[in-house]
Structures are given as structure tokens and as C-alpha cells.
Amino acid sequence: MKLLEGKVALVTGATRGIGRAIALRFAEQGANVAFTYLSSVAAAESLVAEIEALGVRAVGFASNAADFADAHKVVEQTIAEFGVLDILVNNAGQTKDTLMLRMSEEQWDSIIDTNLKSAFNFTHAVVPAMIRRRSGVIINMSSVVGTNGNAGQCNYAASKAGLIGLTQSIAKEVGSRNVRVNAIAPGFITTDMTDKLNDATKQAIISSVSLGRMGAADEIANVALFLASDMSSYITGEVIKVTGGMR
């Protein structure tokens, strides 16, 4: 039997990178998958086709994860479509990097809204149904930058650190109802975000990693699968670093 056979998962920001890898890994393990995307209809349609080719159902919702009402609407539509929602992955995120002294208010607010408020929005929407069923899993995608900080990323670091606080607090609120909440803190993973880095920066990053390479999105998806499945049934309120041994 597959690890997520018959489960329903919702992954925000899933048309590329880590979110896409998670959506596909969950589908491979038997989950029906709903996901959100912001703008690319073609990417969403492609992901639906790939997921359904694995023998499960998929639906994509065009949604601004930072919008409270939008998030609640997506959750309602997901439950209407599949009858239940077992797993939420708060993955939607972006970067707008610059030194703090050069950072605009918009650059700060945009990252906090997209990376942190979006997780609150979707968690707020799914928790009542999970509590009623006394079952559910929430996974928040943080970052090693949220635990260590990084120059030029104070907005991103603050949003990812906030996700850790959100994770640990909500885990304490809902644990008695058998709802588990955990976070993943990836290190430097090969995605569209890191592809923008120049070669010298990439090499500097790799030199600080014990395994001597950047990670792959699939390696984060494997950890998400573990946390979403019954293999992690006694784990909640935790932050799992996946960094290749960053020093």
C-alpha cells in the first residue's frame, strides 16, 4: 500500500521548484492533490496532467495565497471537490533581496505577506475541519535562513523565522486533536531562485556544505512525504533542517 493512499493534499505555490516536487511525490504515493498557483495557467495544466497520469485526481486553483478570503475559498473548494482535506503544505513563497538600508516598505510587506501571512491564511482555513475529524497534517516550508539569518535577506529571513514560530505555536494548540504541524528548513536547493545566483556565489555556498553540493527539490519532497505520512505519527512542533550539513 502506498504511504498516502486515499489521502487528499493541498500544496500552495506548486507549479515549480519544491512545491511541484512535493505535489508529484504525494501523487506517486497515492494522494489526490489540490494546489494553488498565482499566474501560469500553462504550468498548472501541465502539473494536473502529470499528477493524473499517476492514477490520482488533481485540481489547480488560481489564487493569491496572501489573500485571506482567497485562501478560505480554496480550502472550501478543495473539500467540496474531494470531500476531505488531510494534508496542507504551506509552500508559497518568494524573495525580494536587498540590504535592509535599501529595502522599501513594499519589499518588506510583500515578502511577509507571501511567505508568512499566506501560511496563517491557509492554516486558519483548514484547522477547523481537521479538528472536527481529529486528524490532519500541516507542513510549513521554512528555510535555514529563518534559523541563521542572511545578509541582504532580512525580509525573507523574518518571514521564514515567523513560520517556525507559527509551526510551534499551532502544534501546541491542535495536538490534542491529533493534528500535527511541522516545518522543513531547506538549505540551498537547486530551484529557480538559486539559479539566479552567479557561479562565484554558488561555489561559495557549496564550499560551506559538508556534502559538497546543493540539494535537489526531490530531496525536500522526500522529507515532506515522511512528515505527511504515518511514519512520523509522533512528530509535531518540530523543524527539520535539510541542508547537506551546512556549516
Image (cartoon, rainbow, N blue to C red):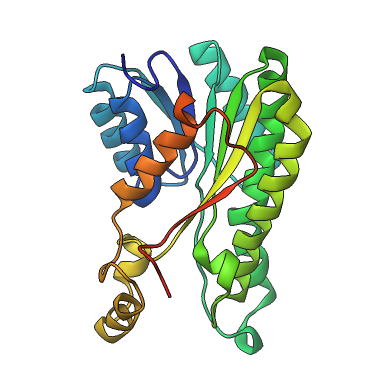
Outermost residue toward the left in this view: 53
Question: Residue 138: percent from the left, percent from the top?
Answer: 58, 35
Q: Residue at point 69% right, 44% down?
A: 120
Outermost residue toward the top in this view: 83
Front-lying residue, 17 or 209: 209
Q: Quadrant of residue 31?
A: top left
Question: Residue 105: percent from the left, percent from the top?
Answer: 69, 74
Residue 159 visible to an observer of this rendering: yes
Front-lying residue, 55 or 241: 241
Q: How many marks?
A: 0
Rendered view: 228 above or below 31: below
Outermost residue toward the right in this view: 173
Q: Residue at point 33% right, 26% down?
A: 27
Q: Quadrant of the N terminus?
A: top left
Side (left or right) of 17 relative to 7: left
Q: Quadrant of the C terminus?
A: bottom left
Q: Residue at point 66% right, 36% down?
A: 123
Q: Residue at point 41% right, 13% down?
A: 6
Question: Residue 137: percent from the left, percent from the top?
Answer: 57, 30
Rendered view: 5 above or below 234: above
